Image: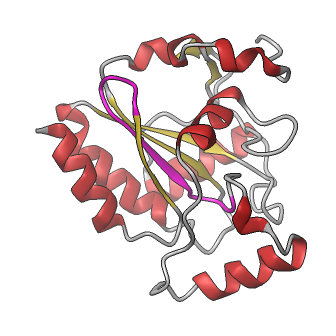
C-alpha cells in the first residue's frame, strides 16, 4: 500500500484510494464506483456495537439496489477494538452475521488517518451529536475532557460515525453514532430510487 501520510492525498481522486480488506487483499475504491456507499468506522467493545445488527439489516434490504457498506474497524477511541484482524472478522461474523465488506483495522483521525477518512472529514463537517440520544452527554463529557475544543474540528469523534456517498462519488452526509438508523435509512432509500 502507498504511503499517503503526506499532503498528496488531496490530489487524489476517491477512486484511486487503496483499501486493505480484513483478509489482507488490497483493492481500490474504484471497485465501488457507481454504488451508494455508507462508510463507517467500527469497534467490537463499544456502546454502539449493536449498530452492526442494524447495518447488516440495512445492507440486506438495499444491497440489490446498489448499497455497499464499508466497515473500518478502529482502535482509536478508548481502545474499543483491541483484537487483530482475524479476531475482528470472527466477532463480526459470529455475533452479527456481517456480510458487508470489512476492512483491516484503520486509523481514522490524526497524523496517520487513512486518506479515505481525510477526504471524508474534509467534505462533511462535524455538526454535533444528536441531542435526544442517551449517550450524547457522555460522549461530550469524554471528548471535552480530552480536548475542550473538540467541537471545532471535523475529526471523527467516536466509533460508528457514518458517511453517505452517492453514486457519483459525492459525500452527501455525515451521521454521528448518536444518529438514529431510521434517519440513515431514509437517506439511503432516497439515493436508491
Q: Where is residue 94 in the image (x, y as percent from the top left)?
A: 52, 53
> What residue sits 57% from the left and 70% below the top?
128
Q: Where is residue 178 in the image (x, y as percent from the top left)?
A: 50, 72
Is residue 160 in the magenta section?
yes
On screen, residue 148 versus residue 58, left or right, reads right
On screen, residue 18 versus residue 71, left or right, reads right
Q: Quadrant of the N terminus?
A: top right
> What residue sits 68% from the left and 20% below the top?
10
- The relative height of residue 45 versus residue 35 in the rendered view (above or below) is below
From the image, give the main secondary structure of the stretch colored magenta.
Answer: loop
- The relative height of residue 79 versus residue 34 in the rendered view (above or below) is below
| Viewer-proximal residue among 85 and 31 | 31
Q: Position of residue 73 (x, y in %)?
A: 66, 46
On screen, residue 131 versus residue 2, left or right, reads left
Is residue 84 in the magenta section?
no
Residue lying furthest front in this view? 152
| Viewer-proximal residue among 151 and 162 | 151
> What residue sits 32% from the left and 23% below the top?
168
Q: Quadrant of residue 102?
A: top right
* The magenta segment: 157-170
Colouring method of the image: secondary structure
> What residue sits 24% from the left and 30% below the top?
66
- The relative height of residue 93 versus residue 8 in the rendered view (above or below) is below
Please count the marks in the image: 0
Q: In which quarter of the image is the C terminus?
A: top left
| Viewer-proximal residue among 131 and 178 | 131
Amino acid at each position: 500500500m502507498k504511503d499517503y501520510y503526506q499532503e498528496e492525498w488531496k490530489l487524489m481522486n476517491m477512486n484511486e484510494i487503496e483499501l486493505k480488506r480484513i483478509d489482507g487483499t488490497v483493492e481500490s475504491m474504484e471497485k465501488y464506483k457507481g454504488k451508494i456507499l455508507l462508510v463507517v468506522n467500527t469497534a467490537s467493545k463499544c456502546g454502539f456495537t449493536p449498530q452492526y445488527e442494524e447495518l447488516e439489516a440495512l445492507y440486506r434490504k438495499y444491497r440489490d439496489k446498489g448499497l455497499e457498506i464499508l466497515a473500518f474497524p478502529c482502535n482509536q477511541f478508548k481502545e474499543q477494538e483491541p483484537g487483530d484482524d482475524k479476531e475482528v472478522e470472527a466477532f463480526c461474523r459470529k455475533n452479527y452475521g456481517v456480510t458487508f465488506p470489512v476492512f483491516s483495522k484503520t486509523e481514522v483521525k490524526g497524523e496517520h488517518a487513512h486518506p479515505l477518512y481525510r477526504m471524508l472529514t474534509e467534505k462533511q463537517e462535524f455538526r454535533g451529536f444528536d441531542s435526544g440520544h442517551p449517550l450524547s452527554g457522555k460522549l461530550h463529557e469524554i471528548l471535552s475532557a480530552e480536548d475542550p475544543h473538540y467541537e471545532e474540528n471535523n475529526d471523527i469523534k467516536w466509533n460508528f460515525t457514518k458517511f453517505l456517498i452517492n453514486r457519483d462519488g459525492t459525500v452527501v452526509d455525515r451521521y454521528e453514532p448518536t444518529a438514529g438508523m431510521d434517519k440513515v435509512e431514509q437517506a439511503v432509500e432516497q439515493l436508491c430510487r
